Image (spheres, grey):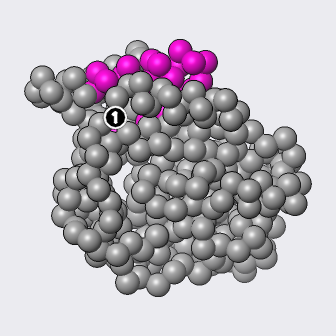
Amino acid sequence: MRHDWSVEEVEGLLAQPLLKLVADAAAVHRASFPDGDIQLASLMSIKTGGCPEDCSYCPQSAHFSGTGVAKEDLLSVETVLEAARAAKAAGASRFCMGAAWRSAPKGSPRAEEQFNRVCQMVEGVRGLGMEACATLGMITPQQAQQLKTAGLTAYNHNLDTGADYYEDIISTRQYADRLNTIENVRNAGITVCCGGIIGMGEETVHRAQLLATLANMTPQPESVPINALVAVEGTPLADMPPVDPLELVRMCAAARIMMPYARVRLSAGRLRLSREAQTLCFLAGANSIFYGEKLLTTGNNELALDQALLRDIGAGDVRVLAAA
């Protein structure tokens, strides 16, 4: 494990012949994880749409119309815990809650009530004997500590892309804001889930910047989602062409080499991948997928198809977890 990757070095890694890159990543993977260890992660939206951010890829942004996402207020504690119970009954041991906020609510009685409600959800999930994780946007050190006290296990906060391309995708917050939130999470003793998206018009150097930033964190993120853009009608990136699956393979392989002990999660965009492309991503070091036929607002693979694929590739004793 290293924390001194240069962007140029990562560019060279991504440019290696694909078969060599995959072979090297597979060797690191075998040395770091048991064979067939693939984590299945599920995700529930607890507050949907109406987000004040202008993330160009996101159908939940209030800045865009015609995305087909209806605004829904924060769910009740019991509604969320009912879903958590169902997840546990299906074999889940970890449950994640995602809210479309720029930052976790604070500063008014209503905001405090909403944040306290999320903390109650976390406490309730832990009370079921499950791990709990959340993605709520930016959080302060105090909020991170409150979540830790409530029992939160993990926090998801993606960097999305490289620092030099960030302003082309989002204008309502700075890259430093994301890094500050991750620092607040770490300082509170909560584990970090942090990754990015490819296929947004970025260049290889921006992908290299993203990976270098993640790998140079101390400690490195415990989970690294690798997303392919899901182009949604109504968003500024609606007309972007689909990502070449081999580009996802390269990202998974580089992430595995650079972050040997992280869960490299093959995330959004997997619905467009063939069984063969997914298998190549697993060979390249991905060892987690989102499991369930809906992510926050977009479609995902059918459960039966995922179960068949994992069985056919010999994933072994697949663990069903719900994670960010």
Q: Quadrant of residue 78?
A: top left
Q: In this view, does 54 lie above or below 106?
A: below
**Residue 194, percent across and down?**
48, 48
Asked which secondary structure carries label 1, the reply is loop
Q: In this view, does 170 lie to the left or right of 322?
A: left
Which residue shows up at 57% across the image and 27% down it? Answer: 85
Which residue shows up at 41% across the image and 63% down it? Answer: 161
Residue position marked by numbered label 1 in the rendering:
75
**Residue 144, percent across and down?**
35, 27
7 falls in the magenta region: no
Q: What residue type is labelled 1?
A: Leu
Q: Is residue 282 left or right of residue 36?
A: left
128 falls in the magenta region: yes
Q: Is there any visible trace of residue 24 in the rendered image?
A: no
The magenta-colored residue range is: 115-136
Q: In this view, does 311 lie to the left or right of 305?
A: right
Closest to the observer, 49 or 8: 49
**Residue 60, percent across and down?**
30, 58
Which residue shows up at 63% across the image and 50% down it? Answer: 291
Q: Is there any visible trace of residue 78 in the rendered image?
A: yes
